[in-house]
Amino acid sequence: MGKKGREIVEVDVKKLLKLLQKAYADEWIAYYAYKWVADVAHGIESPHMAELADKTADEEEEHADELAERILELGGDLPYGIEKLYDLANCKTVNYPKDLGDIKGILQALAEAEGCAIDVYNKIVKFLGPCYDKDIKTFHLIHHILAEEIKHEEAFENLL
Ligand SMILES: [Fe+2]
Ligand SMILES: [Fe+2]
């Protein structure tokens, strides 16, 4: 990021980067979880579920891209490696039912996982504080991602 762009950030950048790197790891795990569900849903011929899972996976991937851009702008490292991502993630797994034909169980697990993502972004919004102008760009990014995670949870809950 340019000199001025960095100067106007008035939060503890080290702490913020840690939060963003952890969220980045969460997004990759979420992306994988949705691609996996989409494959399962194709297998059990549940096209609506497959379509929703694929669409959600695309949005999680977009979140990862957006977080990556901001992490690099703030001068942070981008975590690399499956084990590293797993270590960093706040929401490490989705508690899928054993019976993969249990669509309701899958939907419940996904709604719960979105609940975890909502907590992650809500925490970052709170970290950035009521004075959102301390880091406007990150604030808007997190605000945008949080809104999409809320939409995801709602989408899965509505199918229950
Ligand atoms: Fe996400
Ligand atoms: Fe999500």
Image: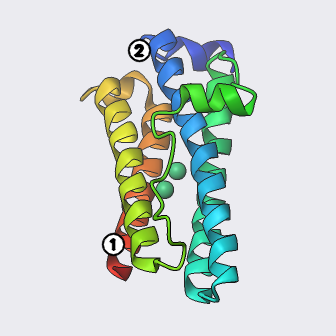
Nearer to us of marks 1 and 2 is: 1
- Identify the residue at horizontal 45%, vertical 54% (top origin): 95
* Circle nearer the N terminus (1, 2): 2
Q: Relative to the observer, which residue lies in front, 63 or 80?
A: 80
- Identify the residue at horizontal 44%, vertical 25% (top origin): 135
Q: Is residue 50 left or right of residue 23?
A: right
Q: Relative to the observer, which residue lies in front, 18 or 88?
A: 88
Here the colouring is rainbow
Q: Relative to the observer, which residue lies in front, 113 or 6?
A: 113
Labelled disc at residue 126 = none
Give the number of marks: 2
Identify the residue under disc 1: 157
State the image quarter where residue 55 is shown. Answer: bottom right
Percent coordinates x, y for residue 1 in the rendering? 69, 21
Give the position of the C terminus as an image quadrant: bottom left
Rendered view: 68 above or below 158: above
Instruction: Name the secondary structure under disc 1.
Output: helix
Identify the residue under disc 2: 11
Farthest left residue in view: 130
Rendered view: 82 above or below 151: above
Rendered view: 124 above or below 74: below
Q: Is residue 97 left or right of residue 46?
A: left
Tag 1: amino acid: Glu
Tag 2: amino acid: Val
State the image quarter where residue 57 is shown. Answer: bottom right
Q: Is residue 58 left or right of residue 139?
A: right
Q: CA distance from mark 1 to mark 2?
A: 35 Å
Instruction: Name the secondary structure under disc 2.
Output: loop
State the image quarter where residue 157 is shown. Answer: bottom left
